[in-house]
Each structure stands twice: as structure tokens, then as C-alpha cells.
Amino acid sequence: MKTLYLVFVALLLGCFGAQAQFTLSGEVNARSEYRNGFKTPILESQDPAFFVEQRVRLYANYKMEDLEVQVDLQDIRMWGADGVVDKDYGGSFGISQAWARYYMTPKISMKMGRQIISYDNQRMFGGLEWAMQGLRHDALLFMYEDTLGLKVHVGAAYNQNPATGSEPVRLTGTYYPSFTANGPYHATGNYKHMEYAYLNKKFSAASVSAYLINDARQYGLDDSVANRQTYGLMGMKKLGDLALNAEAFYQGGKIALSDLSAYMFSLSGTMKTSITPITIGYDYLSGQDPNSSKNTVFAPLFGTNHAFYGFMDYFYVGNGHKGGLQDIYLKTSFKIGKGSLLGHVHYFLTASEVLDGAGSDIDNGLGTEVDLVYVRKLGTSGTFKLGYSQMFATDSMDAIKNIATGSSSVNNWAWAQLIFTPKFL
């Protein structure tokens, strides 16, 4: 401990001597959840679940004139994973981020290591910080950013895991799952490699972004790799108190042995009023066309899907489905005393024809979800959140979730969260 203390003091003195900046901050984040039909309708024979999950992080950042280094340590655990007297560690301790960014010029930099890749509204790239573990990439980025609002990023990642213990090492855990009713398009684990280009230009009352993404996954026992390409545009325009947003993405290439042709688009408008902002929008994600020989199911890539398709995570949070999705939504928020109340209403429909177990078309209406979240600051470094969501599912929801009989008519989810983010140095 004495040696660590001396090293820490030496680092601090070195920072001050070199006129560098060193910051050390933390996070203690605990969320309790009551799940009674979360992600999928609960069966009448099932009991609700209740648990407390916690994330603790230590953020360290070192910044000089031409170099920045970020190292984040995190511990993730479920309360009770370790016994009160137990030598076996049940949590997950490791690195959340570990990257270095070198500035070749004030506008051009290179960033490498384990990092968050997050752009715009996090539709395609996001940090997924709602989930305790987050979403990270081991990647190399080249970035151009100027003071006039232009940003151009080019990134690449190549994943390899010597789990076999033999040469040449091969990546494991990136294969597509076997075909199920939900289809093979929703791959699990790492991609084999990923390349992307991102461009964003901000104007005084508008912005536009362009995406070009290639991600590849293994699908065979050897080195069989399928490449999927995603192209997209996002735009925002302010007209007084009205902000208009539009997005469009197309996916091509291959999913395993199947040709891919899928798309999604989103349209929304947000009006600021004297009481509250009101957002009305519509999202469309293509499903499987029964008359097409291609795979026509759109799959969101590395985004924070929890923020878009209802907080109960019925769609695209590890649980995509072949029917695609239409989402008609209304979002708003109100100030209540020293806090604020967020309210969302979603009406979900399938985007393509879906058959039930008997081979008949199901109605495309899936149900309505209501999400409420109360947020209040606690002092200078704390936040309290309280949430409740209710899903009013139809019989069609049971069909796409492969529930034959016995689902409950009441599906809800409640949670409470405490977050503290102290700054140590």
C-alpha cells in the first residue's frame, strides 16, 4: 500500500510539473427491479422477479497537450451473488474503458483501445449505459474535428480470441445461432471485424449525419465470414419552437448464407410549449417479406435500443423477431416540484406478415406500452430515479413471442435507482 501511495503521489507531481490535467472520479449505481412481464409476456404459472443490481466505477483521465488517456475500472454484481462470508467472488470486475487518444494536430487525432463509440441519438452506435455492463468496442479510430461543426470519424476493429489454445488462434463466440422462429439474423457475441465511416456537420439550426458501416460475423466451423453493410442518413432542422428529425438506413450484404435487403426509417417532431416539450414520432423497421428469397429483416447494430422501442425491452434488446416493427409514439416530460416526470406512450405493430402456429395471419397490432420515470437530483452528485411501465399486450404479441397459451393479462415493470458520481480529484 505504501508503494502504491508513493507511485500515486509521483503521478500527481508529474502531472502538475508537465502542466497536464489528471482527474479521478467515481460512480456508485444501484437499481432494484420488479419484473412481471419484462421483455416478454409473463405466464400465469410464473412468479414475478425481484433483484438489486449494482455498478461501481472508478474513472481516471490524464490529459496533456497532445495526449489523453482514459482508464475506467468497474465492478458489476447482483446483490447476494456473494455470501456474507464467502471466499468465492460472484461479481464481474474488469475494465470498462482503456484507451489513448493522440492528437497529431489540433484537428486530427487517433484513438485506440477499449472504448465507447456513440453518435447522435445512439440509434446505431451507443454506450448502452442503462445496462450495468455498457457496450464497448476494442477499436482504432482516426478522427477529424474542427471548430466549424464538421466531424469525420473512420474506425476499425478486428476481434480474435485464443480460446482454442492452438495456432493459428481463431475467434470464438461470434457464430449465428441456429434457425429459430426469431430467425438467425440476431447474432450473439462479438463480430469478427467491423469498419465504419461517420460524418456529421452542424449548422446554426440544423445538423446532418451520414453512416457507412460494415460488420462481419462467422457462420461456419472454419473461417466462413458474412459481411453486412449498413448505410444511413440522419437530419435535424429547427423551425422556431419546432424541431424536426428524420432518419433512414438500408442494410445489404450477407447474413450467413442469405442475401440481405432490409431498411428502417424514423420521423419525429418535437414542439416546445410553455408547459412541456411534446414529441410525436413514427419508427418503421422492416420484417421478413414472405414473398422474398432474401432476408429482409432489419437489425439495429450497436445502438441503445432501450431508449427507442419502449423501456420494457420487448424489441431489439437481445430479442429481435422476424415480423419487424412499427412504433407510433408520444413523448413528453413535466417539472414536478424539485424533480421531473417523463412520460412515453408507444403503440406497436408488426411491419410484415406473421403467421401463428396454425399457419394463419395474425393481426399486426401488438400492444400499447406506457412508460413513466420520475427523476430528482440529490445534492451535487446524486440522482434518484423511479420508474413504472405497463404493457397492454395483444394475442399477436403472444404469437411473435412464441407463447402458445397461459400468458398473463397484466405485464408491468417497476424500478428504483440511486446514482452517485463523486469527483475525487
Image (spheres, helix red, strand yellow):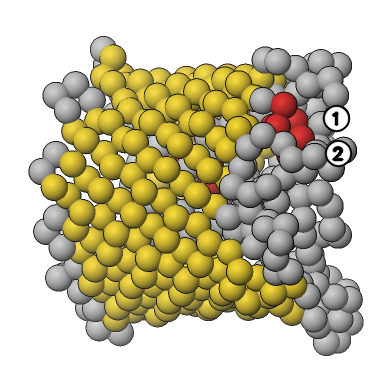
Kind of residue indicated by mark 2: Gly
User: What residue sits right under mark 1 in the picture?
Assistant: 404
Q: For residue 64, what is the image quadrant?
A: bottom left
Residue 59: give x, y in percent of width and height: 45, 51
C-alpha distance separating marks 2 and 1: 8 Å
Name the mark nearer the viewer: 2 or 1: 2
The one of 345 and 101 positioned closer to us in this rendering: 345
The one of 23 and 11 positioned closer to us in this rendering: 23
Badge 1 element: loop
The answer to whether residue 247 of the structure is visible from this angle is yes
> Badge 2: few (under 14), some or many (20 or more) residues near its Cα, within 10 Å?
few
> Residue at position x 66%, y 20% from top?
411
Q: For residue 344, what is the image quadrant?
A: top left
> Residue at position x 58%, y 55% from top?
286
**405 lies above or below 162:** above
**310 lies above or below 10:** above
The one of 253 and 105 positioned closer to us in this rendering: 253
The answer to whether residue 125 of the structure is visible from this angle is no
The one of 67 and 371 positioned closer to us in this rendering: 371
> Residue at position x 19%, y 67% from top?
149
Residue 94: give x, y in percent of width and height: 63, 53
Kind of residue indicated by mark 1: Ala
Q: Which mark is residue 357?
A: 2
Q: Is residue 163 left or right of residue 329?
A: right
> Badge 1: few (under 14), some or many (20 or more) residues near its Cα, within 10 Å?
few
> Residue at position x 37%, y 65% from top?
233
First along the sequence among labels 2 and 1: 2
Badge 2 element: loop
Q: Is residue 346 left or right of residue 178?
A: left
Residues at circles 2 and 1 in contact by the CB criterion of under 8 Å? yes
| Furthest residue in direction bottom, as rendered | 168
